[in-house]
Image: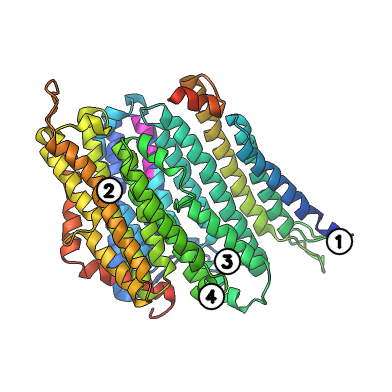
C-alpha cells in the first residue's frame, strides 16, 4: 500500500471526481471533495516525511520501467509543492460548504465540487510526474477545470474573465507542448531524468535554445509573471471566493515549481543561467512586477482585485529568488511558495467571509466592518501583516532570506526594491484597515460575524502564518533541501 | 530549392502564425476560438511530422519481413492526447461564448467592454 502511495495520491481524487458529479446531492458531493482533499493532504505529508528521511522515491506506472514508461518521482522539491496543494485544499474544502451554497446555484454545486477535485488532481499530477508530456496532460486537466470554476462566479464578468484566461492559458500550454516536442525531437525521450542526462551531451544547436524559449514563455504565462499576468486580476476578482482562495494559493505555485523543474533539473542551471542568461530576463521583470503591481494594487476599489495585483507582485518575489540562481536565492523562492500560499489563502478566505455576509468586497461597502465582523477583519489584518513582512509572520521569513540572497551577490538595489515593495504593501493593506476599523458602521447595516466553519478554516491558515513565522526551522529545512536537489548538490 | 525538403515545417510555421494572428487580432470571440484551433493544429502537424520517416510504415511487426523502416509512433500517440485536449478546450471555450452571449447580448469584444461598464 505505502509503496503505491505516489500514484494513489493522484488516482484517488481522479476517480472521486466523477462520483462527486454523479451523486448529484450537494452535501454528498461536498463530502467526497472533503475526503479527496484530506487524502491528498495526508498522503502528501507522508510522502514528504518519507522523502526527507530516505531520499527520492521513483514509482514506475504500471511497472513499465523508465524511460519508456511514465515515472512518478518524488523529491523534496515536489513533495513540498504537493504538500502546499494538499494543505490548501484540505483547509479550503470545509470552508467551501457554506460559501459555495451562497455563491453558486444549487443545481451546479455537485459539478462545482467535481471540477474542484479535478483541478486539485491536475495540480498534484503536474507536481508529482517525472515525464514532461504527462506534465502537459495534467496541466490541461487543472486548467480546464479552473476555467470552469472561474466561470461559476455570480458576476457576469466572471464569464469574460474565464474566457480570457482560457485563451491565454491555452496559448501558454500550447507553447509548452511546442517546447516539449522540440526537446523530444533532439533527445528522443520524455523522461525528465533522461532529458537531464542527454541534453548536456548534445552538440550545440539551435533547436534546444528555441525549445527553452518556448517553455519559458509558456510557463511564465501560466505563473502570471509580469507582463504576462493580464488574465489573472479579472479571474481572481470574479471567481467564487473559494475558487479564488484555492487557485491563488496553488495554481501559480505549481507553475513556479514547473519553472524550477525545467530550468534547474532538466536544462541545468549552467545552461539556463550561463548560456541562455535567463537571470537577465527574469530579474528585471520580477523587479518591475514587484514595484508596478504593488502600486496598481493601491488604486483598486475591489479588495479581491487589490489582492490579485498583490499576488502578481508576490510572484515577482518568487521569481526574483529564482533569478538569483544561488542556493540561498532558491531557498527564498521555494520558501515563499509555501509562505505566500498561507498568507494569500488567509486573505482571500477573509474576503470570502465578507462576501458571504455583505455580498460585495468593494471597499466602500466595508465601512466599520471590523465592529460587525471582528474575527474576519482580524484575520485580514493578520494576513496583511504577513504580506507586508512584519517579524513573527511567514512574510518576514521569506523577505529575510530574499534580502540575504540579494546582498550575498552584492545586489543592494534589489534588496532596496524588496523593501520598497513591503512599504507599498503597507499602503494597500492600510487602505482596507482604515475603512474597516476607523469609520462608522453604516447605520442601516445588519451584518453578523461569518459562520463558524468559515472562520475556523480562515484562522487555521492565519495561525499557520504565525506558527511558521515564529519557528521557521521546519519550512526552511525543507526549502533548503529542495534548493540543493534542484541545484544538483546533495541528494 | 532550399527548405523544400522541410515543406511540412513551413506549413507548420504558416498555420501557427495564421492562428496566432487571428487569436490576437480578432475581436469576435468565436473567431478567436477558431484562431486557437488553427494554432493548436499547427502543433499537431509539427509532432506528426517529427515521427514520420520517409518510406516508414506503421510499427507493426510482421513475421518474415526484414529491413522494414518504421515510423516513430510515440509523437503520433502523444498528439492523440493533445487532440483530445484541443477538443475539450474548444468545447469549453464555445460554451463560454454561448453563456457570454446570453449575459451580454453580444460576442464582440469591444461591445462587451462597453456594456460591462
Which one is earlier in the sequence, the residue at label 2 or at label 4?
4
Left or right for A18, reference A435: right
Query: Could you say whether the residue bearing mark 3 is in a helix, strand or loop?
Result: loop
Q: Label 2 vs label 1: CA separation?
A: 56 Å
Query: Could you say whether the residue bearing mark 4 is in a helix, strand or loop?
Result: helix
Q: Residue at x 50, y 67 (%)?
A: A280
Label 3 resides on the chain identified as: A
Which of the two discs, 3 and 2, sits closer to the camera?
A: 2
Label 4 resides on the chain identified as: A
Residue B59 visible in the picture: no
The lab-note entry on whether marks 4 and 1 share a chain reads no
Q: Does the magenta-highlighted stretch encompass residue A110?
A: yes
- Residue placed under numbered mark 3 in the picture: A68
SS assignment for the magenta stretch, majority: helix
The lab-note entry on whether marks 3 and 2 share a chain reads yes
- Residue placed under numbered mark 1 in the picture: B2
For the record, the magenta segment spans: A109-117
Which one is earlier in the sequence, the residue at label 3 or at label 2?
3
Left or right for A165, reference B75: left
Q: Quadrant of residue B74?
A: bottom right
Mark 2 is surrounded, within 10 Å at the Cα level, by few (under 14), some (14 to 19) or many (20 or more) other residues, namely many
- Residue placed under numbered mark 4 in the picture: A274
Q: Nearer the viewer, residue A147 or A122?
A: A147
Q: Label 2 vs label 4: CA separation?
A: 36 Å
Q: Residue at x 22, y 49 (%)?
A: A384
- Residue placed under numbered mark 2 in the picture: A345
Which of the two discs, 2 and 4, sits closer to the camera?
A: 4
Amino acid at each position: 500500500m505505502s509503496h503505491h502511495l505516489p500514484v494513489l495520491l493522484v488516482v484517488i481524487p481522479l476517480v472521486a471526481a466523477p462520483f462527486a458529479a454523479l451523486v448529484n446531492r450537494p452535501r454528498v458531493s461536498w463530502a467526497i471533495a472533503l475526503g479527496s482533499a484530506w487524502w491528498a493532504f495526508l498522503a502528501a505529508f507522508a510522502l514528504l516525511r518519507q522523502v526527507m528521511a530516505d531520499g527520492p522515491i521513483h514509482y514506475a506506472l504500471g511497472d513499465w520501467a523508465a524511460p519508456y514508461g511514465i515515472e512518478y518521482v518524488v523529491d523534496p522539491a515536489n513533495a513540498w509543492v504537493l504538500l502546499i496543494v494538499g494543505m490548501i485544499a484540505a483547509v479550503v474544502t470545509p470552508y467551501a460548504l457554506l460559501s459555495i451554497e451562497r455563491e453558486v446555484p444549487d443545481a451546479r454545486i455537485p459539478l462545482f465540487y467535481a471540477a474542484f477535485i479535478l483541478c486539485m488532481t491536475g495540480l498534484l499530477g503536474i507536481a508529482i510526474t517525472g515525464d514532461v508530456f504527462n506534465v502537459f496532460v495534467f496541466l490541461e486537466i487543472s486548467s480546464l477545470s479552473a476555467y470552469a470554476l472561474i466561470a461559476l462566479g455570480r458576476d457576469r464578468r466572471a464569464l469574460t474573465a474565464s474566457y480570457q484566461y482560457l485563451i491565454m492559458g491555452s496559448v501558454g500550454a500550447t507553447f509548452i507542448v511546442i517546447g516539449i516536442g522540440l526537446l523530444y525531437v533532439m533527445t528522443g525521450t520524455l523522461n525528465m531524468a533522461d532529458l537531464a542526462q542527454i541534453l548536456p551531451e548534445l552538440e550545440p544547436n539551435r533547436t534546444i535554445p528555441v525549445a527553452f524559449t518556448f517553455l519559458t514563455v509558456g510557463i511564465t504565462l501560466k505563473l502570471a509573471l509580469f507582463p504576462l499576468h493580464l488574465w489573472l486580476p479579472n479571474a481572481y476578482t470574479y471567481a467564487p471566493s473559494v475558487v479564488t482562495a484555492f487557485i491563488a494559493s496553488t495554481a501559480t505555485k505549481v507553475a513556479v515549481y514547473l519553472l524550477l523543474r525545467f530550468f534547474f533539473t532538466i536544462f541545468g542551471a549552467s545552461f539556463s543561467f550561463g548560456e541562455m542568461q535567463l537571470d537577465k530576463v527574469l530579474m528585471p521583470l520580477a523587479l518591475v512586477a514587484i514595484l508596478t503591481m504593488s502600486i496598481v494594487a493601491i488604486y483598486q476599489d475591489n479588495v479581491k482585485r487589490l489582492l490579485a495585483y498583490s499576488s502578481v507582485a508576490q510572484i515577482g518575489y518568487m521569481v526574483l529568488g529564482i533569478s538569483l540562481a544561488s542556493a540561498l536565492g532558491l531557498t527564498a523562492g521555494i520558501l515563499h511558495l509555501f509562505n505566500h500560499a498561507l498568507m494569500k489563502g488567509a486573505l482571500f478566505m477573509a474576503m470570502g467571509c465578507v462576501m458571504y455576509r455583505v455580498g460585495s468586497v468593494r471597499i466602500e461597502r466595508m465601512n466599520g466592518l471590523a465592529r460587525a465582523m471582528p474575527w474576519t477583519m482580524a484575520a485580514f489584518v493578520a494576513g496583511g501583516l504577513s504580506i507586508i513582512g512584519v517579524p513573527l509572520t511567514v512574510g518576514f521569513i521569506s523577505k529575510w532570506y530574499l534580502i540575504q540572497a540579494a546582498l550575498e551577490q552584492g545586489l543592494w538595489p534589489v534588496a532596496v526594491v524588496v523593501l520598497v515593495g513591503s512599504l507599498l504593501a503597507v499602503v494597500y493593506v492600510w487602505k482596507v484597515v482604515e475603512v474597516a476599523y476607523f469609520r462608522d458602521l453604516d447605520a442601516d447595516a445588519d451584518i453578523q460575524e461569518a459562520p463558524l466553519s468559515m472562520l475556523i478554516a480562515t484562522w487555521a491558515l492565519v495561525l499557520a502564518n504565525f506558527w511558521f513565522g515564529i519557528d521557521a526551522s521546519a519550512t526552511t529545512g525543507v526549502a533548503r533541501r529542495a534548493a540543493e536537489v534542484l541545484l544538483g548538490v546533495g541528494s | 530549392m532550399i527548405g523544400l525538403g522541410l515543406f511540412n515545417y513551413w506549413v507548420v510555421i504558416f498555420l501557427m502564425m495564421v492562428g496566432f494572428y487571428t487569436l490576437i487580432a480578432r475581436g469576435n470571440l468565436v473567431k478567436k476560438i477558431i484562431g486557437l484551433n488553427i494554432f493548436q493544429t499547427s502543433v499537431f502537424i509539427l509532432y506528426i511530422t517529427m515521427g514520420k520517416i520517409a518510406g516508414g510504415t506503421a510499427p507493426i511487426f510482421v513475421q518474415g519481413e526484414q529491413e522494414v523502416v518504421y515510423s516513430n509512433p510515440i509523437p503520433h500517440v502523444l498528439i492523440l492526447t493533445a487532440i483530445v485536449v484541443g477538443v475539450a478546450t474548444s468545447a469549453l471555450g464555445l460554451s463560454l461564448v454561448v453563456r457570454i452571449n446570453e449575459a451580454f447580448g453580444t460576442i464582440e469584444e469591444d461591445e462587451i467592454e462597453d456594456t460591462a461598464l
